[in-house]
């Protein structure tokens, strides 16, 4: 029998709170983390079509870490260190008592160290002084800087990987960690999603792609409105989420608290278009179906979907269509929520942060509201969406994440078993 | 050692800032790696700061000799002494309008 895998710890850095309890309180209250961008100052915002984002305010690494590990990495990896510190403490895992080669780290990151990257590139081109490029430029922008620094900070010597599939990165990180533990290559995997690239260049790039909302610059908290008729693009966000995954046997042995079981995963490519999903939704439906089969559950058992739902015109409609296609009459009985309605789209962090919202829903029996779902778009009709928090005992839940590059991921979670819950000493 | 107090102070301040230590506690005899605990990457970062502070470029072949605080101070003094460029021409940097072609 294959090893069951459970979630035993969580940590988060988000635009609506640093720390899981702060995040969850704000999420259940439907609080928005979207606001006007001020961090580009003195760079003028006038030329940007979109002027708002889900930003982590007043973040200073020294406030969260005693060690120097945060000093040599970019903002996204600093977020990752902070969310991981919380998740490890939450899990009660004591590294000193573990075999370090059995603890892995898998990080999902879409953009990586763009803060330093952009600064150094700009200076080089303006000043034309190659010898003034910072010696840490390469290690900082290398996309596995977060997975590397986390291993160094905690002495985790198992598999150390970074997955970069744009907006589905950390959903794949969860899935790959599940496989890694199932296959017996690790007892514990620290799974992280992190991105922090609200920078003048990256933001301009998303504006040029016409991917971002521009109608609600004067009402930032109204701009991220998945499945609503007046949605007009996503809102860029930033943050990090960490989930501690471990084999149920390992969790039991150390009497860990179990939040939920992570039970299935699927990864597919639409092999279709760099940034546009297939409009019939069949590939998305197929991905969800494969993940459910991997979890050995049927569509009829699903109670909740944490949707990818970025608030783009096409993306939301395709996801809704795919859900209806796969779940048929069950669709109306499935609760759905869009975490991005609160914090924007945190790109590579989105899978992990959505995963945390999902696990909290399983654990607390509460589903956070979908903000700004004021005027339901008939093209995205899903009965289970709500502007208010929903109370529900969830047995099986699905996490969706789709990325540029025609990339799809789906992850299935289950309620912890009575035996899992008993293991808490 | 003939020292220019300004140079010595600047270097020890840069080191103190980097190491989060009192610059007064940093001695010229201190070995960068063995005494101050800088790894090879940290030495490179420190020299990067010193290049900035003194508007210098330190070629790779000079790095090998820079193992103590004193070596660094002497090296910078020597370089600044030699670099007798009385009239520092201020370059104005224009926003790059060129399409990557440098004028020859």
Image: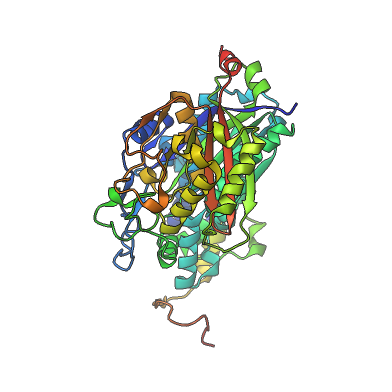
Q: Can residue B72 be seen?
A: no
The quarter holding residue A24 reads top left
Residue at screen point 28% across, 51% down: A220
Q: Residue B2: x and y, percent? A: 52, 56
Looking at the image, how many numbered discs can be counted on the residues? 0
Q: Quick check: B66 above or below A129?
A: above
Image quadrant holding the C terminus of chain A, namely top right
Q: Residue A416: x and y, percent? A: 56, 23
Residue at screen point 36% across, 41% down: A370
Please name whichever residue, A331 or A275, is drawn nearer the observer in this view of the structure: A331
Q: Quick check: A404 above or below B40?
A: below
Please name whichever residue, A395 or A193, is drawn nearer the observer in this view of the structure: A395
Residue at screen point 51% across, 67% down: B81
Specify whether A37 is left or right of B63: left
Q: Residue furthest left?
A: A218
Q: Can residue A340 be seen?
A: yes
The quarter holding residue A231 reads bottom left
Please name whichever residue, A96 or A335, is drawn nearer the observer in this view of the structure: A335
Q: Quick check: A366 above or below A170?
A: above
Q: Quick check: A164 above or below B23?
A: below
């Amino acid at each position: 029998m294959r090893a069951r895998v459970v979630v035993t710890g969580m940590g988060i850095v988000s635009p609506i709170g640093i720390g899981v309890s702060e995040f969850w309180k704000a999420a259940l209250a439907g609080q928005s983390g979207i606001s006007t961008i001020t961090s580009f100052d003195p760079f003028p915002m006038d030329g940007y079509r979109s002027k708002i984002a889900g930003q982590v305010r007043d973040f200073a690494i020294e406030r969260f870490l005693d060690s120097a590990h945060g000093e040599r990495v970019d903002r996204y990896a600093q977020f990752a260190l902070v969310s991981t510190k919380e998740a490890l403490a939450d899990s009660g895992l004591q590294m000193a008592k573990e075999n370090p080669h059995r603890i892995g780290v898998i990080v999902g990151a879409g953009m990586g160290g763009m803060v330093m990257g952009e600064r150094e590139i700009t200076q080089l081109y303006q000043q034309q002084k190659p010898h003034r490029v910072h010696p840490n430029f390469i290690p900082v922008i290398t996309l596995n800087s977060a997975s590397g620094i986390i291993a160094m900070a905690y002495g985790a010597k198992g598999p150390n990987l970074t997955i970069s599939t744009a907006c589905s990165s950390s959903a794949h990180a969860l899935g790959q960690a599940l496989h890694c533990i199932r296959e017996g290559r690790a007892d514990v995997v620290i799974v992280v999603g992190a991105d922090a690239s609200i920078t003048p260049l990256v933001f301009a790039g998303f504006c040029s792609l016409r991917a971002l909302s521009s109608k609600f610059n004067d009402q930032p908290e109204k701009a991220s409105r998945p499945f609503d008729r007046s949605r007009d693009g996503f809102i860029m966000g930033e943050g990090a989420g960490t989930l501690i995954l471990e084999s149920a046997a390992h969790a039991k042995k150390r009497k860990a608290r179990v939040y939920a079981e992570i039970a299935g995963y699927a990864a597919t490519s639409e092999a279709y278009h760099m940034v546009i999903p297939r409009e019939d939704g069949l590939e998305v439906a197929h991905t969800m179906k494969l993940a459910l089969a991997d979890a050995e559950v049927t569509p009829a058992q699903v109670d909740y979907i944490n949707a990818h739902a970025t608030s783009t015109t096409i993306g939301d409609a395709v996801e809704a269509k795919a859900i209806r296609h796969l779940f048929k009459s069950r669709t109306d009985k499935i609760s759905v929520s869009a975490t991005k309605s609160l914090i924007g789209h945190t790109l590579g962090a989105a899978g992990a942060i959505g995963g945390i919202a999902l696990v909290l829903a399983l654990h607390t029996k509460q589903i956070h509201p979908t903000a700004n779902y004021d005027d339901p778009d008939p093209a995205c009709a899903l009965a289970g969406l709500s502007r208010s928090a929903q109370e529900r005992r969830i047995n099986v839940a699905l996490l969706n994440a789709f990325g540029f590059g025609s990339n799809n991921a789906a992850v299935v979670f289950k309620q912890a078993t009575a035996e899992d819950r008993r293991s808490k000493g | 050692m003939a020292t220019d107090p300004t140079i010595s102070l600047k270097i020890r301040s840069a080191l103190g800032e980097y190491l989060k230590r009192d610059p007064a506690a940093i001695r010229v005899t201190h070995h960068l790696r063995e005494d101050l605990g800088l790894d090879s990457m940290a030495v490179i970062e420190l020299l990067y700061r010193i290049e900035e502070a003194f508007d210098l470029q330190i070629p790779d072949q000079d790095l090998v000799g820079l193992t103590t605080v004193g070596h660094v101070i002497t090296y910078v003094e020597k370089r600044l002494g030699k670099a007798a460029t009385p009239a520092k021409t201020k370059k104005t940097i224009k926003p790059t309008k060129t399409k990557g072609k440098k004028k020859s």
